[in-house]
Image (cartoon, helix red, strand yellow):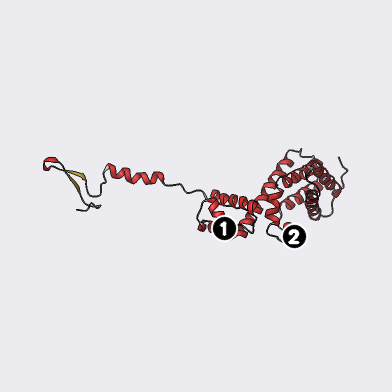
Amino acid sequence: MPRSAGHNWVAQLAGGTSVLLSVRGVPSSRQNDSMRSPAKSRPRTKPPEQRRDELMNAAERLFLAHGVGATTIEQITSRAEVAKGTFYLYFSSKDDILAALRDRFALELLAKIKAAIAEKKKEDWKGKLAAWAAATVSGYVESIRLHDILFYGSRPAAREGLVDNIVIDHLVELLKAGATQGAWSIDDPRSTAVFLFSGLHGIVDDAYSQQKRVQRSRLTDWLERLCFRAVGLPPR
């Protein structure tokens, strides 16, 4: 007789005595244990933010190792240990995850810049501008390979780096605030910020192409002096 849910289960003991193992709708303790055990081993679902970060981290490592063009979505999902369909819950394409990595790079660089500026006294505008120069050079030099993979690896148009650039936008606000407080005088904060940002890339890129070992202190000093001249301040 098959043992199915909704039937009484009876075991035949020695001497012909029958014993009821379970009744309709009430599982035995052994059944309860077997029903609970799968739930204990069931993996927890990760928060969407964590899953998204894991996909981005996997893509970043693969881009650094093989380049953007040679990396496939299948490789990214395999590295992140998720199904391919999971990728499309967070990103529409490889270009989409590349754009997300660019945004994260800019946000992390901006956080370093803000932290450096925050260490200066409220009225020390010259110090704030010098901190911007030092933090920007440091952030760029420390992650230049990742920067080049993300921003140059897929060969975007050069002017795209100046559109919706949060590092430039932050510098614009710093220059405006300093001008308002009479720390310096500039005609066009936006143009000045773009000039300084482009100058940063120029001196670092040139240093890497000309030198085997880049001297960060020299680059920082050069950019600092460029910043001071751009706003009409004397060098330190």
Q: Do the residues labelled 2 and 1 touch (CB within 8 Å)?
A: no
* Residue 21, image x, y percentages: 21, 44
- Element at label 1: helix
Q: For this rendering, which residue is in front, 205 or 114?
A: 205
Q: Does residue 175 appear to the left or right of 111 in the view shown?
A: right
Where residue 192 appears, as percent x and y from the top left, is 81, 53
Q: In this view, does 14 lie to the left or right of 187?
A: left
- In the image, residue 228 sits, relative to residue 85, either above or below, namely above
The residue depicted at 80 percent of the width and 56 percent of the height is 191
- Residue beneath disc 2: 158
Q: What residue type is labelled 2?
A: Ala
- Count of numbered marks: 2
Where residue 154 appears, x then y in whole percent?
68, 59
> Who comes first in sequence, dot 2 or dot 1?
1
Looking at the rendering, which quadrant does residue 162 occupy?
Answer: bottom right
Cα distance between the residues tagged 2 and 1: 26 Å
Q: Quadrant of the C terminus?
A: top right
In the rendered image, residue 228, in percent from the top left (x then y), is placed at: 84, 46
Badge 2: few (under 14), some or many (20 or more) residues near its Cα, within 10 Å? few
Callout 2 secondary element: helix
- Residue 73's label in the rendered image is 1
